[in-house]
Image: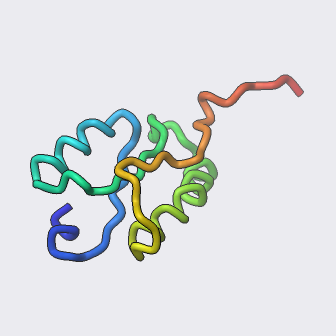
Amino acid sequence: MYLEKRGVPTSTVVSTAFRVHGRLAAKNLQMDNLPQLVVPHPLNDLTPDEVRELARAAYPVVIEQLTGTNKQALDTLVNYDHPATRSKVPA
């Protein structure tokens, strides 16, 4: 957030569990319109391959936030289904 205040583009990533906290922190820093990239929570149980999958899903939004190519929503949810929420179909 401090870089954004200095005019340096950033991408602020928060998990769903910290979405409200991130919004309140931005408000406290007088940055009410800071876009947040919101990823599923929790992250600590993802495998390295799942982290790469999440990063690929988030990448386009990160690029948009860093380049300012599109108007950003306040909160952009990454299109990624957390493995714990995926339906398990027997093989």
Residue 46: image location, x then y, percent: 54, 42
34 lies left or right of 59: left
Query: Splitting the image into 4 quarters, where does residue 91 fall?
Result: top right
Q: Residue furthest front?
A: 71
Residue drawn at point x = 35 percent, y = 50 percent: 74
Q: Residue furthest right?
A: 91
Percent across and percent down for residue 69 are 45, 74
Question: In which quadrant will I find the N terminus?
Answer: bottom left
> Which coloring applies here?
rainbow
Residue 64, horizontal then vertical, whole percent: 46, 68
Residue 11 location, x and y as percent?
36, 63
Residue positioned 44% across, 50% down in the render: 76
Does residue 12 lie above or below 47 as drawn? below
Determine whether, in the image, residue 65 is placed left or right of residue 47: left
Q: Quadrant of residue 9?
A: bottom left
Q: Is residue 12 above or below residue 90?
A: below
Number of numbered markers = 0
What residue appears at the point 45 percent right and 64 percent down from the top-left corner?
62
Instruction: Pick the residue in front: 79 or 83.
Output: 79
Q: Residue at x 46, y 68 (%)?
A: 70
